[in-house]
Structures are given as C-alpha cells and as structure tokens.
Image (cartoon, rainbow, N blue to C red):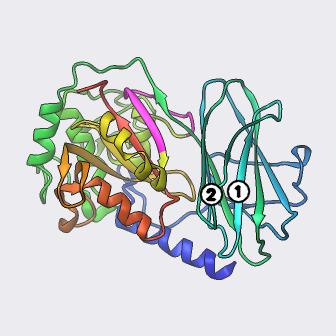
Amino acid sequence: MQMQSKKCIKRRFFCRLICICLLISSIIITATPVYANTSESESNNSFGTANSLTLGTEMNGKISSTSDIDYFSFSVSNGQVINVNLADIPSGCDYDIKLYNNSQTEVGSSTKGGNANEYIKHTASSSGTYYVKVYSYSGSSTSYSYALCVMKGDITTSNTNSSYNRNNAKWYAETYAAWPGNTNYTNYASMGGDCTNFASQVVNYGGMSMQGSPNPGYNSSWYWYSDSSRSYSWTSANWFRKHWANYNNDGYNRAYRFKIYTVDTAIDNFSTIYSELWPGDIVQHVDRGNGQSYHSQVIHKYGYNSSNGVNDLFYAQHSTSSSGFYKDGSLYDYLVNKRNRGEGSDWFITIQIKSGS
C-alpha cells in the first residue's frame, strides 16, 4: 500500500507542478499538493452500510478477501451523467464494479480482465441515492488499495454561441502560441502557469464577451482588464471550467457542450471527440485525486496525422516556461503518452464553446 500510494502521489504532484494554472485575482496559489482522498470504513458490504462518497474526491479501499464487497453511495438528480472510475487495482487482482440506481437495480457495470482500470458512464433516469459496488472477480490484497472516484458531467446546453468566430480563435491561437504570447497581457508562466490565461484570450478573441466584473469569484464572471482586475476564471483552469462548464454540477455552463472522460476512454472514443471539437474549443486535464482541472489546451486545427495514422486534433498551449508555449501538438499522442506513463485513469474533459463549426 505505501509504495503504491507514494508512487501515485509523486506522479500527481509532478503533473500539478507542470502547469497548475490556479491564479486567483492577485493571489498566486502555489503548487503545494492538497489531496482530500478518503478511505473506506468497514463494514460496508451491503446497500444499507454503504459509505458515502464525496463526488470528485478519490476513495481508497481494500478488497481483503475474494468474498469482500465494498458499497459506496452518492446522490444524483434525474438526467445527470455519472462517471465512475476505478483505478490502482493491485497487481495479480481483477476487481470489477457495478452501478445501481435508487431502487438498487443494476444500471451499469465494468468487468475488464486483469487489473485494468474500470469505468462506467451512465445517465440517471431518476433522482435519488445511487450505489457503486466494488468486488473481486479474482484475487485480493490486504496491503494495496484501489482508488474509486465518481464525477458528474456531460451537459449539452441551449447556448449555441453562434456568434463565436472559430477562424478568429484559430488565428489568435496560432499567432500567439509561441513565447512570450501577446505582450498586452501579463505572462503568468513563472507564477503557476499561463495555459488558461492563453485559452481565455483565444476564446475572447473569437468573440465571447467578458462579463461579471467586479465579482472575480462568481461562476458567472470571466474577465481580464489588468493583472489586478481579473476574474478567477480567466487564469485558473478549474474556475475556467466552472464558468464555461461545471465542476460536479457547480458551474455557469456557458459553453455549448461539456464532456468527461478518462484518458483511456478518451483514446477509445477519439473518433467521437474528433467529430465534436473544432478550432477554438478547449480541452483540459484533471487531477484524478480531487477532480480539479490543472491544464488547458486550445484546439486550433484538425486532420489526418500521418505520423500516427489517425484523424487527429492539434492543440496550442502555454505552460510554465518558454518550452511549453507551442502549437501543432497532437492531442491523440498527448493522451497516449499519458496512458503510457500509467495515467490512463486520469480525467480528461472537453469544452465545446460553440455548436458545430
């Protein structure tokens, strides 16, 4: 358990150091890792004794014998999309998951072989308490914990944002991707990361208006007039998400569409992502431990990529140093590289600003 946990924490800390992008007003939030992970409380082997889950927060548990079963509960509303993610399954073990609705009827399952990550996406057809069951198909461990996380997500709004000019957004992303970016704005590379500041500039140049001043911490606020007069959402990746989409149903939902994936499922469904995203849309990478976005990238072109043989999306981004300011990055390769680093169970989200092209 200790070796595995330290490995996971070290990896997530490194990811957060790359581009934490949490710049709030004139206060800079440093890259100190904060993990709100919780551990199961036995006995939770029935619906009646299920542990309550905090959405977006990782729950650690152990399957101590092949007959051990763990139940967890959380509340949902009718129509909400539920994303259930089970990771860190110990070597030599095969754990599976099932999802149950408020009538304790099974509505979803994931039963991959070996210690592969398990994932369920489900749209709730009724409000109430839902349950996740973690159980062993084979193997158990008293030393190593699994990690379970549930996130709400996937919305399509009536905000088609038809005035958003994707050509203008594309031009801006490609023109100012390189270091130092547009010098009319503060460069936050050395102060936590410039990725979301750049994404906000692109979306604004595409025609999406600033709004909400002087309330920097409201989900409805999104503006930059100077370094000392800006909303949290302009420079913070997670607050950007709370303005344009939501964080576990807390958000302004100004974008047209928002979807949650794991890295593994994003790769598996890349053709769908390719068909839905256009230049000027935003993708984000999310800390699996606390569900918060830490890095934003801008889609600026698409097409067949001869180097990997797929129809690919290409991103522009800023980060924490000049080497992280570039365009023409392959999103498919970026995701595959994350999976190859053992980050296949990390969250990945898409924010489609406008309906269609």
Range drawn in magenta: 248-260
176 vs 124, nearest the viewer: 124
Q: Nearer the viewer, mark 1 or mark 2?
A: 2
User: Which residue type carries mark 1?
Assistant: Asp
Q: Is residue 349 left or right of residue 334?
A: right
- Looking at the image, which residue is at 42% across and 28% down? 220
**Magenta-drawn stretch contains 113:** no
Q: Is residue 63 left or right of residue 327?
A: right
Residue most extreme to the bottom: 3
**Residue 43 spot, x, y in % from top left:** 91, 58
User: Which residue type carries mark 2?
Assistant: Lys
**Which residue position holds label 2?**
112
**Magenta-drawn stretch contains 251:** yes
**Residue 225 spot, x, y in % from top left:** 23, 38
Real-space CA distance between mark 1 and mark 2, rounded to the nearest whole angstrom: 7 Å
- Looking at the image, which residue is at 66% across and 24% down? 78
Magenta stretch prevailing secondary structure? loop
Q: Is residue 24 visible?
A: no
- Looking at the image, which residue is at 31% across and 24% down? 355
Q: Is residue 230 visible?
A: yes
Circle nearer the N terminus (1, 2): 1
Residue 249 lies in quadrant: top right
Could you say whether the residue bearing mark 1 is in a helix, strand or loop?
strand
Could you say whether the residue bearing mark 2 is in a helix, strand or loop?
loop
**Which residue position holds label 1?**
96
Quadrant, the N terminus: bottom right
